[in-house]
Amino acid sequence: MNFPARLLIFPALLISLILFGCTVTLVQPYDAELYKNTEAFYKKASTMILKGQSSSPTTPQQLAGIPPKTASDNPGHFSKFQNDYDELLVDSNALILRSLANSGSVDEIGKQTQAKIEGVIKGNVTSECDTAQQDFPSVDLTTRNYIDLKCLVAKWKKEHQGPAGASSSKQILKKANWEGREKTLFDSILAIQSAEAFKNKTIGESK
Protein backbone atom coordinates (compact mmCIF):
# COMPACT_ATOMS: atom_id res chain seq x y z
CA MET A 1 0.00 0.00 0.00
CA ASN A 2 1.41 3.43 -0.86
CA PHE A 3 2.07 6.04 1.77
CA PRO A 4 -0.93 8.38 1.35
CA ALA A 5 -3.48 5.57 1.05
CA ARG A 6 -2.39 3.91 4.29
CA LEU A 7 -2.14 7.21 6.12
CA LEU A 8 -5.71 8.08 5.16
CA ILE A 9 -6.92 5.19 7.32
CA PHE A 10 -6.61 7.42 10.39
CA PRO A 11 -9.85 9.40 10.66
CA ALA A 12 -12.19 6.61 9.51
CA LEU A 13 -10.49 4.06 11.76
CA LEU A 14 -10.66 6.33 14.78
CA ILE A 15 -14.32 7.14 14.20
CA SER A 16 -15.19 3.44 13.92
CA LEU A 17 -13.34 2.57 17.11
CA ILE A 18 -14.98 5.38 19.05
CA LEU A 19 -18.48 4.59 17.79
CA PHE A 20 -18.14 0.96 18.80
CA GLY A 21 -16.87 1.90 22.25
CA CYS A 22 -13.40 0.45 21.70
CA THR A 23 -10.32 1.80 23.41
CA VAL A 24 -8.23 3.64 20.85
CA THR A 25 -4.73 2.24 21.27
CA LEU A 26 -3.44 2.56 17.72
CA VAL A 27 -2.65 6.26 17.96
CA GLN A 28 -1.24 8.70 20.48
CA PRO A 29 -2.94 11.67 22.13
CA TYR A 30 -2.89 14.95 20.24
CA ASP A 31 0.46 16.74 20.45
CA ALA A 32 0.48 20.38 19.34
CA GLU A 33 4.27 20.48 19.12
CA LEU A 34 4.36 17.39 16.93
CA TYR A 35 1.73 18.99 14.68
CA LYS A 36 3.85 22.14 14.44
CA ASN A 37 7.04 20.20 13.72
CA THR A 38 5.29 18.18 11.01
CA GLU A 39 4.23 21.42 9.34
CA ALA A 40 7.83 22.67 9.49
CA PHE A 41 8.98 19.40 7.89
CA TYR A 42 6.50 19.92 5.07
CA LYS A 43 7.74 23.46 4.44
CA LYS A 44 11.37 22.33 4.27
CA ALA A 45 10.59 19.38 1.99
CA SER A 46 8.44 21.58 -0.26
CA THR A 47 11.28 24.08 -0.59
CA MET A 48 13.62 21.31 -1.74
CA ILE A 49 11.02 20.11 -4.25
CA LEU A 50 10.54 23.61 -5.67
CA LYS A 51 14.30 23.90 -6.07
CA GLY A 52 14.30 20.58 -7.90
CA GLN A 53 11.50 21.63 -10.23
CA SER A 54 13.26 24.85 -11.20
CA SER A 55 16.68 23.28 -11.76
CA SER A 56 15.87 20.01 -13.51
CA PRO A 57 15.38 19.24 -17.22
CA THR A 58 11.80 19.07 -18.44
CA THR A 59 12.07 16.42 -21.17
CA PRO A 60 14.00 13.14 -21.60
CA GLN A 61 15.75 14.77 -24.55
CA GLN A 62 17.03 17.60 -22.36
CA LEU A 63 18.30 15.09 -19.80
CA ALA A 64 19.96 13.02 -22.49
CA GLY A 65 21.64 16.16 -23.85
CA ILE A 66 23.56 16.75 -20.61
CA PRO A 67 27.13 15.44 -21.09
CA PRO A 68 27.97 12.83 -18.41
CA LYS A 69 31.30 14.51 -17.71
CA THR A 70 29.62 17.79 -16.78
CA ALA A 71 26.54 16.33 -15.08
CA SER A 72 27.89 17.10 -11.60
CA ASP A 73 27.91 20.80 -12.47
CA ASN A 74 24.21 20.79 -13.36
CA PRO A 75 21.98 22.52 -10.75
CA GLY A 76 19.72 19.45 -10.73
CA HIS A 77 22.54 17.04 -9.83
CA PHE A 78 22.25 14.98 -6.65
CA SER A 79 25.27 16.69 -5.09
CA LYS A 80 23.30 19.96 -5.03
CA PHE A 81 20.55 18.28 -2.99
CA GLN A 82 22.45 15.94 -0.69
CA ASN A 83 22.40 18.36 2.24
CA ASP A 84 18.65 18.86 1.77
CA TYR A 85 18.01 15.12 1.93
CA ASP A 86 20.26 14.72 4.96
CA GLU A 87 18.52 17.55 6.83
CA LEU A 88 15.10 16.05 6.09
CA LEU A 89 16.29 12.67 7.37
CA VAL A 90 17.45 14.31 10.60
CA ASP A 91 14.11 16.10 10.93
CA SER A 92 12.20 12.88 10.32
CA ASN A 93 14.32 11.19 12.99
CA ALA A 94 13.27 13.92 15.40
CA LEU A 95 9.60 13.34 14.54
CA ILE A 96 10.00 9.61 15.13
CA LEU A 97 11.71 10.17 18.47
CA ARG A 98 9.05 12.65 19.56
CA SER A 99 6.26 10.25 18.66
CA LEU A 100 8.04 7.39 20.44
CA ALA A 101 8.37 9.51 23.57
CA ASN A 102 4.69 10.45 23.35
CA SER A 103 3.57 6.86 23.03
CA GLY A 104 4.60 6.02 26.58
CA SER A 105 5.11 2.45 25.46
CA VAL A 106 8.82 2.37 24.70
CA ASP A 107 9.47 0.13 27.70
CA GLU A 108 6.79 -2.27 26.52
CA ILE A 109 8.12 -2.59 22.98
CA GLY A 110 10.95 -4.90 24.01
CA LYS A 111 14.59 -4.97 22.99
CA GLN A 112 14.02 -6.74 19.70
CA THR A 113 11.43 -4.30 18.37
CA GLN A 114 13.41 -1.32 19.67
CA ALA A 115 16.39 -2.57 17.68
CA LYS A 116 14.25 -2.61 14.53
CA ILE A 117 13.12 0.96 15.18
CA GLU A 118 16.70 2.06 15.75
CA GLY A 119 17.59 0.40 12.46
CA VAL A 120 15.02 2.57 10.70
CA ILE A 121 16.21 5.70 12.51
CA LYS A 122 19.81 5.01 11.47
CA GLY A 123 18.78 4.49 7.87
CA ASN A 124 18.94 0.70 7.65
CA VAL A 125 15.49 0.59 6.12
CA THR A 126 14.05 -2.60 4.70
CA SER A 127 13.36 -2.98 1.01
CA GLU A 128 10.60 -0.66 -0.22
CA CYS A 129 10.56 0.91 3.27
CA ASP A 130 8.13 -1.72 4.52
CA THR A 131 6.75 -0.84 7.96
CA ALA A 132 3.99 -3.41 8.01
CA GLN A 133 2.27 -4.60 11.17
CA GLN A 134 4.49 -7.67 11.45
CA ASP A 135 7.63 -5.51 11.40
CA PHE A 136 6.53 -3.26 14.26
CA PRO A 137 3.81 -5.14 16.14
CA SER A 138 3.92 -2.94 19.26
CA VAL A 139 4.50 0.45 17.66
CA ASP A 140 1.40 2.55 17.37
CA LEU A 141 0.06 3.87 14.09
CA THR A 142 1.17 7.44 14.78
CA THR A 143 4.81 6.41 15.07
CA ARG A 144 4.58 4.15 12.04
CA ASN A 145 3.41 7.08 9.94
CA TYR A 146 6.50 9.06 10.86
CA ILE A 147 8.69 6.04 10.12
CA ASP A 148 6.98 5.93 6.72
CA LEU A 149 7.79 9.61 6.24
CA LYS A 150 11.47 8.98 6.88
CA CYS A 151 11.37 6.01 4.52
CA LEU A 152 9.85 8.22 1.84
CA VAL A 153 12.76 10.67 2.08
CA ALA A 154 15.28 7.81 2.10
CA LYS A 155 13.66 6.42 -1.05
CA TRP A 156 13.81 9.80 -2.76
CA LYS A 157 17.48 10.16 -1.90
CA LYS A 158 18.28 6.71 -3.25
CA GLU A 159 16.37 7.40 -6.48
CA HIS A 160 18.25 10.67 -7.01
CA GLN A 161 21.60 8.98 -6.42
CA GLY A 162 20.79 6.45 -9.10
CA PRO A 163 21.67 2.74 -9.24
CA ALA A 164 24.70 1.92 -7.14
CA GLY A 165 27.77 1.63 -9.30
CA ALA A 166 25.99 2.62 -12.50
CA SER A 167 28.45 4.77 -14.42
CA SER A 168 25.69 5.81 -16.84
CA SER A 169 23.62 7.48 -14.12
CA LYS A 170 23.79 11.26 -14.31
CA GLN A 171 22.13 11.63 -10.88
CA ILE A 172 19.70 14.17 -12.30
CA LEU A 173 15.92 13.89 -12.10
CA LYS A 174 13.37 15.27 -14.56
CA LYS A 175 10.94 18.01 -13.55
CA ALA A 176 8.08 15.50 -13.66
CA ASN A 177 9.79 13.43 -10.96
CA TRP A 178 9.75 16.42 -8.64
CA GLU A 179 6.14 17.18 -9.47
CA GLY A 180 5.18 13.63 -8.50
CA ARG A 181 7.05 14.05 -5.24
CA GLU A 182 5.16 17.26 -4.53
CA LYS A 183 1.82 15.46 -4.73
CA THR A 184 3.02 12.50 -2.65
CA LEU A 185 4.40 14.80 0.05
CA PHE A 186 1.23 16.91 0.16
CA ASP A 187 -1.04 13.86 0.41
CA SER A 188 1.12 12.25 3.09
CA ILE A 189 1.39 15.33 5.30
CA LEU A 190 -2.29 16.17 4.80
CA ALA A 191 -3.28 12.69 6.01
CA ILE A 192 -1.03 12.94 9.08
CA GLN A 193 -2.19 16.44 9.98
CA SER A 194 -5.85 15.58 9.36
CA ALA A 195 -5.50 12.71 11.81
CA GLU A 196 -3.88 14.99 14.39
CA ALA A 197 -6.57 17.64 13.90
CA PHE A 198 -9.25 14.97 14.32
CA LYS A 199 -7.69 13.84 17.61
CA ASN A 200 -7.57 17.43 18.80
CA LYS A 201 -11.22 17.97 17.83
CA THR A 202 -12.21 14.76 19.63
CA ILE A 203 -10.44 15.91 22.78
CA GLY A 204 -12.21 19.28 22.62
CA GLU A 205 -15.62 17.68 22.23
CA SER A 206 -15.03 15.33 25.17
CA LYS A 207 -14.37 18.19 27.59
Image: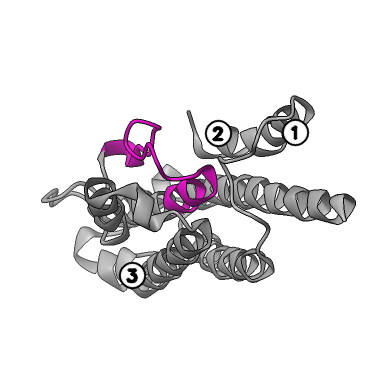
Q: Position of residue 34 (x, y in %)?
A: 60, 66
In which quarter of the view is residue 131 placed?
top left
Instruction: Magenta stretch: give its range.
Output: 127-149
- Most foreground residue, 49 or 167: 49
Tell me the element at label 1. Answer: helix
> What is the total number of numbered labels drawn onto the structure image?
3
Residue type at mark 1: give it. Answer: Ile
Disc 3 to disc 2, C-alpha distance: 28 Å
Q: Let me know if residue 65 appears in the view.
A: no
Question: Which numbered disc flags the more N-terminal residue, 3 or 2?
Answer: 2
Question: Which numbered disc flags the more N-terminal residue, 1 or 3?
Answer: 1
Residue type at mark 3: give it. Answer: Gln
Residue type at mark 2: give it. Answer: Arg
Please tell me whether residue 102 is drawn above or below residue 173 in the rendered image.
below
- Most foreground residue, 168 or 12: 12
Question: What residue appears at the point 87 percent right and 56 percent down from the top-left corner?
Answer: 207
Disc 1 to disc 2, C-alpha distance: 19 Å
Q: Position of residue 194 (x, y in %)?
A: 72, 48
Image side of residue 191 versus residue 136, left or right: right
Disc 1 to disc 3, C-alpha distance: 44 Å
Q: Position of residue 182 (x, y in %)?
A: 58, 52
Dot 1, how many residues are within 10 Å of its Cα: few (below 14), some (14-19), or many (20+)? Answer: few
Tell me the element at label 3. Answer: helix
Image side of residue 142 versus residue 133, left or right: right
Residue 19 within the segment the image draws in magenta: no
Question: What residue appears at the point 51 percent right and 39 percent down from the top-left corner?
Answer: 3
In which quarter of the view is residue 97 placed?
bottom left
Question: What residue appears at the point 75 percent right and 33 percent down from the top-left corner?
Answer: 18
Tag 1 residue: 18
Tag 2 residue: 6
Dot 2, how many residues are within 10 Å of its Cα: few (below 14), some (14-19), or many (20+)? Answer: few
